[in-house]
Image (cartoon, grey):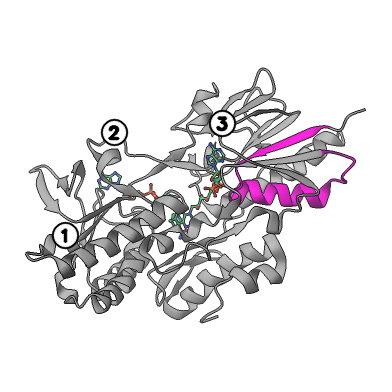
Amino acid sequence: MSKPKIVVLGAGYAGMMTTKRLMQKLRPEEAELVLVNKHNYHYQTTWLHQVAAGTVNQNQARMMISDVINPNRVNLIYDEVVDVKKDENRVLLKNSEITYDYLVISLGFETNTFGIKGMEKNAFSITDIESSRMIREHIEYQFAKYSTDKNPKDEDLAILVGGGGFTGIEFVGELAEKVPELCKKYDIDRNKVRIINVEAAPRVLPGFDDELVSYAKRSLEERGVEFMEGAKINECKKNSFVIGDDNEEIKAGTIVWTGGVTGNSILSKAGFEITKGKVTVNGDMRAPGEENIFILGDCAWVMNEAEGKPFPPTAQAAMQHADTCANNLQALLHREPMNKFVFDDKGTVASLGETDAMGTVFNDNKLYGKPAVSMKKVIDNRYLFLLGGPKLILKKGKLRML
Ligand code: FAD
Ligand code: NAD
């Protein structure tokens, strides 16, 4: 009898950890494992703001998939998923197609511009390694151009960041450290460079602890970041945001949108029922009505029943989805009962550049400054440890200041 074939789509946090766990849980004769990803490398999405600012090299934020997933055990396919024919147990790839008995969809997020005029066309976004590298190169180009132009314009040096959620705040934190370095490199006065974060809500990081938000703002303002709060972006032009009721225009040479994310568009294309771009999963992480399809990470809408709203899409949650999914796939193959997903909230820590951070850990204990910086690195390194053990931490980890 042929072995059941488990196909995992997307090698991000959820897909990598599911594959890793399945390798540990299932004997080779129990199931055939396939992992499909657009690239032959895996990147840590949670480091992309650093790649975009140029404070971390893109090669530190990524690794060859075959270095951590044994290709003799898992069939690694590097191709782009274009559709899922769930009624036929088939996945269409750009260059071929594959069938499955069990499917795990962990294709991550796409940037959500909420239909804001001009945003998709005129703003960069921090979505993957390539899009982040483009931001870094564009910023450096603006500095190089300024230093050689006969009539340089200060506004070309300005960097506008739309959206003051965690991504926007972590990104301006990195910029606060990168900009002085670029100023030195290109002999430009630091005071000529504006870093502006624009947030529609009355305060950045809406819903987060007031004291921690104040701390983050103070730390960033001291390093030259400007905040425009209660400032809704109505339009993005080639070199500006149009903001607020009076349509004030703020110009910049670099414009980055960090105003929101949604699930991968493959989900709606494949005919799943969608809630705000995601699939509302059952307790066992399967798609409703689908016996053999699990949806994880940023593609999954998982309700926090206690608070009556969904859990935010985070790497922390994606890794936990992966554990539940791998357990449940093993249970399905062994004809045992499946587990319900229960989120174990370990807290949230946000970096404010290399030298500062803030957040909450374990039961809302607040952390600031150096302890928070170290905690953030512990979190990043823990993931590398789970994926590839101490060897991977030594190769790719954040070891300074631990
Ligand atoms: P991802 O990790 O994004 O992986 C998706 C994978 O699918 C990628 O490898 C991608 O290349 C692949 N893929 C996509 N489309 C296709 C296709 N069509 N065909 C083939 N492959 C495809 N969360 C935290 O918990 N802590 C943090 O500190 C944190 N920081 C963040 C910082 C930034 C800048 C950003 C953007 C997000 C951050 N998050 C953080 C959120 C976190 O990164 C996501 O929730 C997490 O990456 C979701 O994991 P995932 O596996 O669903 O998707
Ligand atoms: P987000 O949705 O959390 O934040 C987007 C922000 O943009 C919001 O504050 C929103 O009010 C603002 N916004 C939306 N439309 C706007 C407009 N027209 N004008 C001005 N502002 C506008 O998105 P994100 O920051 O990309 O985060 C995505 C997910 O990743 C979240 O779940 C977040 O928790 C997670 N994340 C976590 C960390 C961390 O734990 N350190 C870091 C980054 C991201």
Disc 2 packing (10 Å; few <14; some 14–19; many ≥20): few
Question: Residue furthest toward the top?
Answer: 87
- Image coordinates of residue 323 in percent, x first then y, are 70, 49
The span shown in magenta is 4-31
The residue tagged 3 is 94
Residue located at (25% from left, 43% from top) = 122
User: Which amino acid, by three-letter code, is at mark 3?
Assistant: Lys
Q: Quadrant for the C terminus, please.
A: bottom right
Specify the label residue 156 is tagged with.
1
Q: Is residue 281 above or below residue 199?
A: above
Q: Amino acid at mark 1?
A: Asp
Comparing 153 with 201, the one in front is: 153
Locate residue 78: give its quadrant. Answer: top right
Check disc 3 and report its element: helix, strand or loop. loop
Q: Classify 297 as above or below 160.
A: above
Question: Is residue 37 inside the magenta stretch?
Answer: no
Neighbours of disc 1 within 10 Å: few (<14), some (14-19), many (20+): many
Q: Residue at x 57, y 56 (%)?
A: 345
Q: Which mark is residue 108?
A: none
Q: Are marks 3 and 1 in contact (CB under 8 Å)?
A: no
Examine the rendered structure and indicate whether residue 240 appears above or below residue 84.
below
Q: Is mark 3 within 8 Å of ligand 1?
A: no
Q: Mark 2 sits on what residue?
A: 115
